Amino acid sequence: MDTAALLAFAALSVGLAATPGPNMLYLVSRTLTQGRRAGLVSLLGCQAGSGIIMLGAAAGVTAALLAVPLAYDALRLGGAAYLLWLAWQSIRPGGQPIFAPRPMPVESDARLFSVGVATAVLNPKVALFYVAVLPPFMNPALGGLFWQALLLGSIQIIICTLFDAALLLGAGRVARFLATRPAWLSAQRWVMGIALTLLAGKLALDGRR
């Protein structure tokens, strides 16, 4: 697998990590309510859930690419459509602010971890990323599709873990900053939306490598 493909996939993984969704909403809410330690325990649960999805998707995507000749193009176009959907979610009006305070009960570590796992497993954003965005970066000519999927999935999980950990550690400061500077939050949403749209166009126009 060439370096350019890995870097492009890493960029998309950063886009996934920076796009608000159920995981981010839960992690930030838990951190603001119960503190950084609770947020980090919840993060471990979320990434364990993402690992479960990644293993299942790696097996399923590998089977599809080997069994159906047109599966590559179908998944590539599906990935482009999914990125456009993420772009719309980023810029659509009326979206709920991620850093808005939400009352939540204090939970034990076991409960935090298990809810984190469930949040990730039931998160359609993560599942769709693995099924629609990951396959175009796999190269059947290199063989070992399952291991390619595991490599790419591991890159995504590492990037999301680092991004979310940094977000949680600074959640309080970020919340206070954005509360007095809403224009920054709006600018972030539009930059992310435009970037995801451009990546969707590139994915849709790229043929089989």
Image (cartoon, rainbow, N blue to C red):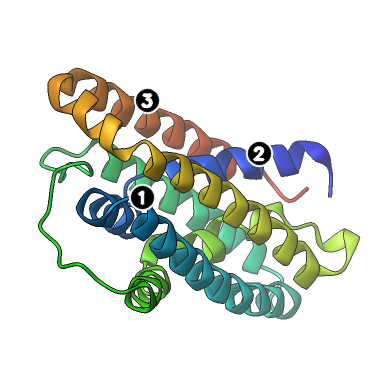
Vertical comparison of 30 with 15: above or below = below
Mark 2 / mark 3, whichever is N-terminal: 2
Tell me which corner region of the image, top left, top right, bottom left or bottom right, holds residue 74.
bottom right
> Which residue is denoted by mark 2 in the rendering?
8
* Measured Cα–Cα span from mark 1 to mark 2: 31 Å
> Which residue is denoted by mark 1 in the rendering?
36
Residue 204: tell me if it is visible: no
Structural crowding at the residue carrying mark 1, measured as other residues with C-alpha within 10 Å and reported as few (<14), some (14–19) or many (≥20): many
Tell me which corner region of the image, top left, top right, bottom left or bottom right, holds residue 58.
bottom right
Q: Position of residue 99 (x, y in %)?
A: 21, 41
Mark 1 / mark 3, whichever is N-terminal: 1
Q: Nearer the viewer, mark 1 or mark 2?
A: 1
Asked whether the residues under the numbered discs 1 and 2 touch, taking CB atoms below 8 Å apart as contact, a structural biologist would say: no
Q: Position of residue 144 (x, y in %)?
A: 85, 69
Structural crowding at the residue carrying mark 3, measured as other residues with C-alpha within 10 Å and reported as few (<14), some (14–19) or many (≥20): some
Q: Amino acid at mark 1?
A: Arg
Q: Nearer the viewer, residue 104 or 64?
A: 104
Structural crowding at the residue carrying mark 2, measured as other residues with C-alpha within 10 Å and reported as few (<14), some (14–19) or many (≥20): few
* Measured Cα–Cα span from mark 1 to mark 3: 28 Å
Instruction: Specify the label residue 191 is tagged with.
Output: 3
Q: Position of residue 3 (x, y in %)?
A: 81, 39
Element under disc 3:
helix
Q: Nearer the viewer, residue 93 or 54?
A: 54
In the drawing, does residue 17 fall left or right of residue 174? right
* Identity of the residue furthest to the right in this view: 142
Name the residue rendered at 38%, 78% in the picture. Answer: 110
Q: Amino acid at mark 3?
A: Val
Element under disc 1:
helix
